[in-house]
Amino acid sequence: MIEKLCELHARDRGYTTAFTTAFPHAVDLAAKREAALASLAELTRRAKSTGHLRSDFVLDDLILILMANGGLHATSTDARVAASRRFAALAIQAFRA
């Protein structure tokens, strides 16, 4: 999930902004956000219970990952995606139990 989120952001940095700006009333974004957070919380709980995720991981750590991924700069989309994949792999390794 972390790899896919980072890659999506690296490929199209404006996707989320453009979508929410162009269609602010088309989707109940608060409900979608709450549903996504609930799913992530459940995924986090399951990963911790199986011993795959550090016990001190919190959802705010995921936000930090996305913010850091947003700081990647490269001259091409391919280079940005490659850097994003490497960053995601390092982040995933850091959060393993």
Image: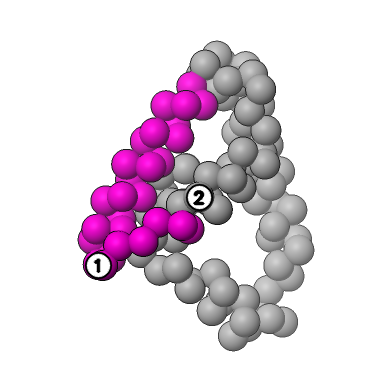
Asked whether 85 falls inside the magenta stretch, the response is yes
- At 64% from the left and 19% from the top, the residue drawn is 55
Q: Is residue 38 left or right of residue 65?
A: right
Asked whether 65 falls inside the magenta stretch, the response is no
Point out which mark residue 68 bears.
2
Q: Quadrant of residue 8?
A: bottom left
Disc 1 is placed on an element classified as loop
Question: Relative to 40, does residue 47 appear above or below in the rendering?
Answer: above
Question: Relative to 81, does residue 59 appear above or below in the rendering?
Answer: above
Q: CA distance from mark 1 to mark 2?
A: 18 Å
> Where is residue 67 drawn, in percent x and y?
55, 53
- At 74% from the left and 53% from the top, the residue drawn is 34
Task: Specify the amino acid type for callout 2.
Answer: Ala
Numbered circles on residues, count: 2
**Could you classify mark 2 by the number of other residues whose Cα lies within 10 Å: few (under 14), some (14-19), or many (20 or more)?**
few
Query: For the magenta stretch, what is the residue range?
Result: 70-96
- At 32% from the left and 41% from the top, the residue drawn is 86
Q: Quadrant of residue 32?
A: bottom right
The residue at the far bottom in this view is: 22
Does residue 8 appear in the picture of this structure?
Answer: no
Point out which mark residue 76 bears.
1
Task: Specify the amino acid type for callout 1.
Answer: Ser
> Where is residue 72 drawn, in percent x and y?
40, 56
